[in-house]
Amino acid sequence: MKIILETERLFLRELTPDDLEDIKRVLQDKDVMYAYEHAFSDEEVCEWLNKQLARYKEDGTGLWAVLLKDSARMIGQCGLTYQHANGKKLLEVGYLFEKAYWHHGYASEAAFACTCYAIDRMHATEVYSIIRDNNIPSQKVALRNHMTLCGKTVRHYYGMDMPHLIYGITANKLDRIRNDLYRNLF
């Protein structure tokens, strides 16, 4: 098990084929997948998992399993993927969590750790979240993590056009925020 990140309450590690059933709990829940307009079929879940495994080899990153430290239960996925929007290749922090674990701050905690990882370890100068325009909870996660709305795009998926908002943060802004947080500790 390759641990990528550790936060106060979570471990993030690479997904493995053994995670298929845990991923199904997330991707086959219509409430969780409302921004995708459908819960995934078994075939779509397998494709999703295989895409993450390929990303690890090709990009050195992807969506990772999010596990609770106290129980090792997988509660979702969060990580960094390269996405195309408006003709640009963006490094995106993305997240999907099991519904039972919404509203506990896990998405914000994991996404912030991933953003810091992108800037500190991958030397990214900017990190983005591309969020469906009707996905208010994910927009709140981006805002809690000090991202600002910086654009819009439309994605064509599942036979329809889906408007998305683009939130972003620069490395300089993240450094200022962390310095302010550090100063406030003393």
Image (tube, grey):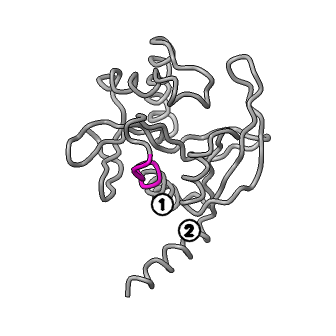
In this picture, is 11 found above or below 183?
Answer: above
Mark 2 Cα shell of 10 Å, populated few (<14), some (14-19), many (≥20): many
Question: Judging from the image, what secondary structure is the residue with disc 2 in?
Answer: helix
Mark 2 vs mark 1, CA separation in Å: 8 Å
The answer to whether mark 2 and mark 1 are in CB contact below 8 A is yes
Residue at (34% x, 26% y) in the render = 22
- The residue pinned by badge 2 equals 174
Residue at (61% x, 48% y) in the render = 129
Name the quadrant of the C terminus: bottom left
> Could you tell me the amino acid type at mark 2?
Leu
In this picture, is 169 found above or below 36?
Answer: below
Question: Judging from the image, what secondary structure is the residue with disc 1 in?
Answer: helix
Name the quadrant containing residue 159.
Answer: top right
Q: Position of residue 12 (x, y in %)?
A: 35, 45
Residue at (77% x, 40% y) in the render = 153
Residue at (45% x, 48% y) in the render = 107
Q: Where is residue 20 in the image (x, y as percent from the top left)?
A: 35, 21
Q: Which of 112 and 133 is in front in this view?
A: 133
Q: What's drawn in magenta, residue-wise?
A: 103-109
> Could you tell me the amino acid type at mark 1?
Cys
In this picture, is 113 found above or below 27?
Answer: below
- The residue pinned by badge 1 equals 116
Q: Which of 20 and 134 is in front in this view?
A: 134
Q: Position of residue 16 (x, y in %)?
A: 33, 28
Name the quadrant containing residue 162.
Answer: top right
